[in-house]
Amino acid sequence: MGRDWDRDRKELTDKLQGWGYLTSPTVRDAFLGVPRERFVPEDVRRSAYDDVPLPIGFGQTISAPSMIAIMLEEAALLRGESVLEIGTGCGYNAALLAEIVGPDRVVSIERLPELADLGRANLAACGYRVEVVIGDGTKGHASRAPYDCVIATAGAPRIPKPWMEQTKVGGRIIAPIGRSRLNQTLVTARKTSDSKWEYKEGTPCAFVPLIGSEGWRD
């Protein structure tokens, strides 16, 4: 018999809820709905539902499910909201976002063409309508702005100005921010007016560095 991925997915989701990482039915349903095993490389697929980061090639990783859950709960997304994801990777996080906000509401930007192709293919194979763009994520994606939420899956030294400009009033940015390339704090920034923001620091984290003109140098 083959691996029972549905069982593994439910077991992980139940654990994340029991540990306090999943608190809303919306995010729980997204975790139950997205087949993580179809987004990770075959050589690490056996660990798809372990709560650990996994390598996806090109020096990049897919975050641990618990970290993803923290960020999605913090984002508090609603159906129909528009989202800009910084760092497509293998496409798993974009799939979760699409489960929550719906089709054609997520734009995901990836600087590595090979990963953009991988993420785009994975998303399409699983039926998710997400626009994947190749480019410098620190510049955002102005042509689809403004966004209700910008969510970054790589760590930046500061919140890039283009993200702030491309966020709606009432919107938020969820991003790992820190002075070290590999150690950050999860920051939530909420745009309360055209010129004012409220900031909240959350959990310490360790994401791959965000490379770009307003991030870290390659």
Image (cartoon, rainbow, N blue to C red):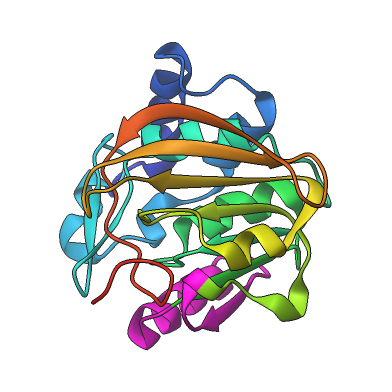
Instruction: Name the spot of residue 10 as percent of width and height, x first.
Output: 46, 30
Q: Is residue 69 above or below residue 103?
A: above
Q: Which residues are magenta?
A: 111-138
The answer to whether residue 125 of the structure is visible from this angle is no
The answer to whether residue 104 of the structure is visible from this angle is yes
Q: In the visual, does 209 lie left or right of 152?
A: left
Q: Is residue 105 magenta?
A: no
Q: Is residue 112 magenta?
A: yes
Q: In the visual, does 161 lie left or right of 81?
A: left
Q: Which residue is at a point 58% across and 44% down the rendered structure image?
A: 33
Q: Is residue 43 above or below residue 50?
A: below
Q: Which residue is at a point 41% across and 77% down the rendered structure image?
A: 213
Q: Quadrant of residue 58?
A: bottom left
Q: Which residue is at a point 31% across and 31% down the rendered structure image?
A: 204
52 or 86, which is in the foreground? 86
75 or 54, which is in the foreground? 75
93 or 134, which is in the foreground? 134
Q: How many marks?
A: 0
The quadrant the C terminus occupies is bottom left
Q: In the visual, does 64 lie left or right of 200?
A: left
Q: Residue furthest front?
A: 195
Q: Quadrant of residue 89?
A: bottom left
Q: Which residue is at a point 30% across and 37% down the rendered structure image?
A: 205
Instruction: Name the spot of residue 164 as percent of width and height, x first.
Output: 65, 58
Instruction: Name the spot of residue 212 as percent of width and height, x first.
Output: 38, 75
Instruction: Name the spot of residue 85 as percent of width and height, x first.
Output: 56, 61
Q: Is residue 213 above or below residue 186?
A: below
